[in-house]
Amino acid sequence: MSNLDYTVEIQQKENLTHDVVRLRLERPEGFEFTPGQAIEVNIKDSAVILEDSPFTLTGRHGQNNLELIFKVYASHEGTTLALSECRVGDKLTITKPFDTFKYKSPGTFIAGGTGITPFVAILRQLNQDGKIDGNELIFANKKVDDIFLKDELHRYLGDNLSIVLSKQNSKTYYYGRVDNAFLKENVKIKNHQFYLCGPQGFSESIKGHLIDLGADASKIMVEY
């Protein structure tokens, strides 16, 4: 990893689900970012050099701390596991922020699991700025226990929040996959902006469905 520019302290650690962690970090003086941007992270003074992995900043740009939300892949014994084992007070090194997602115009955000993280930052900022109207979110997870930030997202979006579960049938949420039939029934397609983020197979599949249904490929932003 290169270009590590700041040393920050972990100020707060919270488990949002059984495998999703939120860290709040000290915000260095002069550190500015745009919602949707990401950073690379390492553990200061660690003998282990972590693999290069972007972590989206999920807070608003006016907050006095930095926030990361990430899924822990324990079986990989990699970056997310190492970060999940850090404690409040530990030091991390982080890079300057770089672009991943840029908000263009109101549209439909479609996220798979922790692929929602760039959208969290964008939606928080839009809500604070009074510009949330016209946006909707489809949040795909496997089971109820995998859902996080539901109440906050519902406050922002109301009925424009749809949660889809692929491996648990629930009376509260859609059951199945975000496939051609679901999109045709629930989403405006023509001349509409889309933002997709999640596992590569998830995002590519949805992009294909949207194009098949008549969406403009130039209006589909994809990140993995």
Image (cartoon, helix red, strand yellow):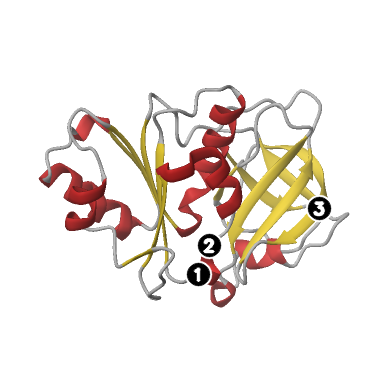
Q: Position of residue 91 (x, y in %)?
A: 82, 51
Under tag 3, what secondary structure? strand
Asked whether, in this view, residue 109 is left or right of residue 155, the answer is: left
Label of residue 12 in the image: 3
Callout 1 amino acid: Val
Per the image, label 1 sits on a secondary structure element best described as helix
Give the residue drawn at x 19%, y 35%.
217
- Callout 1 crowding tier (Cα within 10 Å): few <14, some 14–19, many ≥20: some
Which secondary structure lies at badge 2?
Answer: loop
Q: Is residue 51 visible?
A: yes
The residue located at (79%, 52%) in the rendering is 44
- The part of the image, by quadrant, that contains residue 216 is top left
Residue density around tag 2, few if under 14, some if 14–19, many if 20 or more, within 10 Å:
some
Q: Residue 14: give x, y in percent of width and height.
A: 74, 60
Name the side, left or right, on which 109 lies relative to 51: left
Label 1 belongs to which residue? 144
Q: Tell me where residue 130 appears, x and y as whole percent.
A: 56, 22
